[in-house]
Amino acid sequence: MDMRSPAVVMKASRLGAFHQSRLSFMRQLLRRLKNEQWQFQRSVWTVDAQGVGRAVYTATGPQRSYSLVAFAHDLDPAMRSDRVIATAWDATFALFDGIPDAEDLARLEANVPRQEAGRVSSRELCMARANRSVRLFEHVVQALSEGHQPQREEIDGVGYLMRTTAVYGSGKFGAADRESIALRPELAAPFQAEMLTVYLIRAFTLDLVEHLAKVRAPQRAVSLAPDLRRRFGIGNSTGLGMAPFLLNHPVLLNNWVSARETALQRVRAVQQASAEERRVFADYLKRASASISHWHSEHELQRTRIVQLQDDMSWVQRQLDDGILDQRAPWDALYRWAEAVLSLEAQECLVSLLLEPYAHLVDELGDGMQADEQQSFVIDGGMRVGRLRDILLARYSWVSAIDFSNQSSQALFWYVSEEKLEPRIGRRFDEPGQDLEQPLAVARDIRRLQAALEPYPDEQRLAGFLLQHPEHRHSVRRVQLAPAFPYADIQDNLIDQALLPIDLLRCKLSFFGATHFDPRSDRWVRITLYQGAPLPHELTEMPADDWSCPRLDSQEQHRECIVE
């Protein structure tokens, strides 16, 4: 059974249809936290009646402890914003390496609420900020203060009490560099410090609404029911700042996609599905269909995709009912049918669902999703031009289909804003600034490299070529990676006027484990993280990895029976 070709997988439109899976980083984290029996403690809570103060949540594993230091603020609603340029938030956070003492807390309180205007130290792994949901936060506080639970429909309509607008790590603003923690087993997988930060922020937001409800009505207020508590995730707003990551980290992107594609290959190679494997898949299919019914978006393109996805999931159910899993290599048959019939959104949703019954085939692949990119950064100057041409012919034939003489094919350029040092996109023929362009136009730069190579004989070594043309170093490095890392390149023109940057955002966020993508434009998106996941105090009693699609309750089961 062959893996899917990069020519199929690495198109922006397909990457922009990826869904969370067993390999997503949040799910990897929770499996580890449960398997290693991590302990959680809220050691500090000095939040006052106005919801202002600080809290500390500590997670302790076999070797180390990590502490979320949270600061709650009294924010004027008029200042509440999703924009990265905001200067005030409802809450700010830092993930501390260890357990902070009074001096650490004082230092963090002087800096963390200021975010970019402050500075943290190498004792901090992440810094974050969040705003309350305008629609849901007050509804939940009021309901609990009146002695009853909030409306489930209201919860499902939003999905979170707070929405983070940034979770920074990897050396930003003085925090610890990735290299300093990469060898720790619990943080070896990508973005584990960030995922732990968000997981603990979720616990803080739930404690905060219950605290405010009890302050409002001490005698009457109730706590959230456990099943409703788990229905709250953490929201997130993500913009263009995330998009260039996939282009600047080609080996890491390859390892992520390769793990997912290997997992799919292994499942499609299964020759006969057991009764239990069929049951798990059928259960997840129904749960996914129910979850999709709660997926709302105001973006016309995504709204259309969701409607189509709902119809497509019904078609998948009919295939099951018609016995497609009775044949040999049933999952391969189901995937091949889907590839021929269903939308990209549904095809990639199905890929994720196919992995669910096969933890023993899939989960170990998470160990190979990190990358030491320093090892792949060196250019082989001894390689001959002829060998580079061979790689270009074999791996970059897709570039020849792009007509760069057409203005629309060069309509955009990527740059870094002076104000926030954040990636932005400009319009090449309408806006100034292309002299600040970042080297992210991979297809165009490959074409330029090919043109520059033309006068050079096959036996010429690249060191000599690059001495004369150092502007092509980044492209030569990328091309030399291609044979070993086939999924390293997004095979599309990323400066075309038709580019949808949200496709790049969605790809990365799906590997985080995000759900309910809601684009607000073609350049930023809202998502939900950890919705349905067990809370820290529940991990010892509950499964760590059975929450990506919420379980159906009796009401939803009844509704499905009526529809069927």
Image (tube, rainbow, N blue to C red):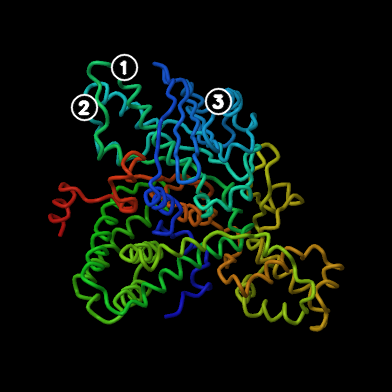
User: Which residue appears at 24% of the width and 25% of the height?
Assistant: 222
Callout 3: 10 Å neighbours few (<14), some, many (20+)? some
Q: Nearer the viewer, mark 3 or mark 1?
A: 3
| Tag 1–tag 2 contact (CB < 8 Å) | no
Residue underneath mark 1: 216
Q: Quadrant of residue 120?
A: top right
Point out the tag, 3 or 2, that comes first from the N-terminus. 3
Image quarter in which the C terminus is found: bottom left
- Label 3, label 1: how far apart the Cα atoms are: 28 Å
Callout 2: 10 Å neighbours few (<14), some, many (20+)? some
- Label 1, label 2: how far apart the Cα atoms are: 14 Å
Question: Would you say 175 lies left or right of 301 here?
Answer: right
Please state which of residues 483 and 319 is positioned toward the viewer in this rendering: 483
Q: Nearer the viewer, mark 3 or mark 2?
A: 3
Point out the tag, 1 or 2, that comes first from the N-terminus. 2
State the SS at label 3: helix
- Image location (x, y in percent) of residue 397: 62, 77
- Image location (x, y in percent) of residue 190: 53, 54
Question: Would you say 393 lies left or right of 298 here?
Answer: right
User: Which residue appears at 51% of the width and 63% of the height?
Assistant: 368
Amino acid tagged 3: Leu
| Tag 3–tag 2 contact (CB < 8 Å) | no
User: Which residue appears at 51% of the width and 30% of the height?
Assistant: 92
Point out the tag, 3 or 1, that comes first from the N-terminus. 3
Amino acid tagged 1: Arg
Residue underneath mark 3: 105
Amino acid tagged 2: His
Callout 1: 10 Å neighbours few (<14), some, many (20+)? some
Q: Quadrant of residue 199?
A: top left
- Label 3, label 2: how far apart the Cα atoms are: 36 Å
- Image location (x, y in percent) of residue 407: 67, 62
Residue underneath mark 2: 148
